[in-house]
Image (cartoon, grey):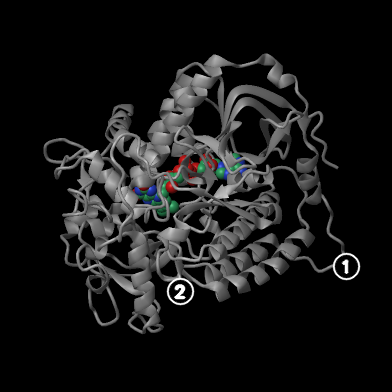
Amino acid sequence: MVSLDSVDTFHFDAIIIGAGGAGLRAALQLAKSDQRVAVVSKVFPTRSHTVAAQGGINAALGNLTEDNWHWHMYDTIKGSDYLGDQDAIEFMCREASEIVRELEHFGVPFSRTEQGKIYQRPFGGQSQNFGESQATRTCAAADRTGHAILQTLYQQNIQAGTTFFDEYFAIDLVKDELGHIGGMVVMNIQTGQYQLLRAHAVMMATGGACQLFKTNTNAKINTGDGLAMVLRAGLPLQDMEFWQFHPTGVANKGMLLSEAARGEGGVLRNGNGEAFMVNYAPHVKDLASRDVVSRAIAIEVKEGRGCGPNKDHVLLDLTHLDADVIKKRLPGIREIGLTFMGLDMCSDPIPVYPTAHYMMGGIPTNFNGQVVTLDESGQSVTVPGLYAVGECACVSVHGANRLGGNSLLDIVVFGRAAASEIERILKLQKPASFFDKALELSSVEARLNKWEAKPDVNAQTESTAQIKRDLQTVMQEGCGVFRNQETMSTLIEQLEPIQKRIDQAVLQDHSHAFNLERLEAFELENLMTLAYATVHSAIERQESRGAHSRVDFPQRDDENWLQHSLYFQQNHQLRYKPVCLTPLTVPGFEPKARVY
Ligand SMILES: Cc1cc2nc3c(=O)[nH]c(=O)nc-3n(C[C@H](O)[C@H](O)[C@H](O)COP(=O)(O)OP(=O)(O)OC[C@H]3O[C@@H](n4cnc5c(N)ncnc54)[C@H](O)[C@@H]3O)c2cc1C
């Protein structure tokens, strides 16, 4: 039996769960202000999913074409299908240019223009002068921007003296006897030992969860652990119906071919060789925002204009571009084509189909990174001691649909802002008596003990890997690019037996060192929790907005649904809160039709 009463306990001012761009930017801020900060990561920090980000980070630097942050803000609000909170969006877009220059000074090796300025490329949903011509706003280090940012932030943290718990798996938040967030139970993956980390501030920076779907662009570690922990702590998740399907995943495999390919001039073609995006977005064509392009591809295939023997994909065509430009600007994605399809995009079009890429929803926060919930009267209140940043958080700057290049920006802007807020609060109060309070450990012990059960020699047992595959398949079918009442009701029925299989599953391997079966079991429980959050949030929202596309309710309905969903695990309860339509300083943008 697992007991956490006498495990090793470590004390910090702040602990950050996650060593992606968000967690590392926050940690750097705290380490530099002499706070004792620890970062926990289930993989070595530079293997976090941020490393895979290809296309770039948005900032209205105006290095190639005229730009300013008001235009960036307008595009982000419009791209969010008006569900983004305008105070947070203004905050992010205003900070963007300065934070990109800060990254440059930290050492990020951005690509350069001939004049030596940071190179920028056009991305979907970017405009000049509030919706007019295409803007060029995405700052890039070739097509390995995330790699460059993550390595640089890691090096800066080493220099600043951040403490790292590398290859530690965070299991659950724990509260103290007064009900305050008091710390985290973690497992040292190398030894299998459980430990307690106690801190005045706990920050979730655990990244995304697209492993919930069968085809996705995400790292295998993106299982939404932090989100599930927050639900188990009795707090809500926001806007979980909004999952972005990226239009150009390698067909039937899912790996990402960045929007940068279309930014550099790539075109999508159907089975008749037509560049079909002109029929869906005559103005911006292939650079329409991702929800629009993904739906267009799905419709082309559904209506029989797909490519290949099964007509189940379309082609991403860059063959008309100069091969040297492809090799210089897109070396990473050319390599993906070569490795996974045996095709060279300099001479061959690449088969693509939409693939789950990004979660717009997550742990609700304000733009200081403080986690918020609703009190009994429906007012937003902050949760003392708990913060969330990065893809696991919902600030919400992406609303119903994220623009390419805005997530790398979100993670560094709000990583820094949340850390500054923690620093401010810790300077005001850091009571030593905080650590004297007893912790409530029984519910997490019960979870851990469930997986201690030994297999019954006569019983048929199944692997958690098989259960995960089945979960991913039903999620993709029931809650993919298009959904309706029927697919989602069926999905809810399908989830029940999957939950039962998880309840009955037992581990075959009970060893301690690097027991990946145990980790996968924890991850599967977390994914299951998010599956329920997603489908219940989605079935309630009776409209189409951004990435939530309901065939049975095809229109956006601002009268009834211009609001954020808040899902609580208990009884799958849903509550709602208004969207912030008041920017910090500039006059509001009225919700109006999106024109492409
Ligand atoms: C292929 C790909 C390309 C992309 N390209 C772009 C792009 O060009 N531009 C852009 O703006 N956005 C892009 N994105 C999105 C963007 O990269 C991510 O949203 C962002 O990097 C997420 O950063 P993060 O710090 O929130 O999380 P991550 O980088 O995912 O880090 C999560 C961290 O949490 C840790 N963690 C998770 N669970 C646990 C646990 N239980 N215990 C301990 N540690 C845990 C992990 O170890 C990891 O360190 C891309 C995404 C993908 C998948």
What is the quadrant of residue 428 in the picture? top right
Q: In the visual, does 342 lie left or right of 324?
A: right
Q: Residue at x 50, y 16 (%)?
A: 34
- Circle 2 Cα neighbour tier, 10 Å, few/some/many (<14 / 14–19 / ≥20): few
Is 429 located above or below residue 473 in the figure?
Answer: above
What is the quadrant of residue 285 in the picture? bottom left
Residue 570 placement (x, y as % from top left): 70, 52
Foreground tag (1 vs 2): 2
Q: Residue at x 11, y 36 (%)?
A: 115
Q: In the visual, does 5 lie left or right of 94?
A: right
Q: Residue at x 40, y 36 (%)?
A: 412
- Is the residue indicated by label 2 positioned so its CB lies within 8 Å of ligand 1? no
Separation (CA) of disc 1 from disc 2: 47 Å
Nearest to the observer: residue 166 or residue 265: 265
Residue furthest to the left in view is 115
Given the image, on which type of amino acid does mark 2 rest? Val
Residue 78 placement (x, y as % from top left): 32, 53
Given the image, on which type of amino acid does mark 1 rest? Asn
Check the picture and name the quadrant holding the C terminus. Answer: bottom left
* Secondary structure of residue under mark 1: loop
Nearest to the observer: residue 420 or residue 8: 420
| Res. 85 in view | yes
- Choose the circle earlier in sequence order: 1 or 2: 1
Numbered mark located on residue 458 in the image: 1
Numbered mark located on residue 595 in the image: none
Residue indicated by mark 2 = 551
| Res. 189 in view | no
Is 35 located above or below residue 272 in the figure?
Answer: above
Check the picture and name the quadrant holding the N terminus. Answer: top right
Q: How many marks?
A: 2
Q: Residue at x 23, y 45 (%)?
A: 71
Q: In the visual, does 350 lie left or right of 374?
A: left
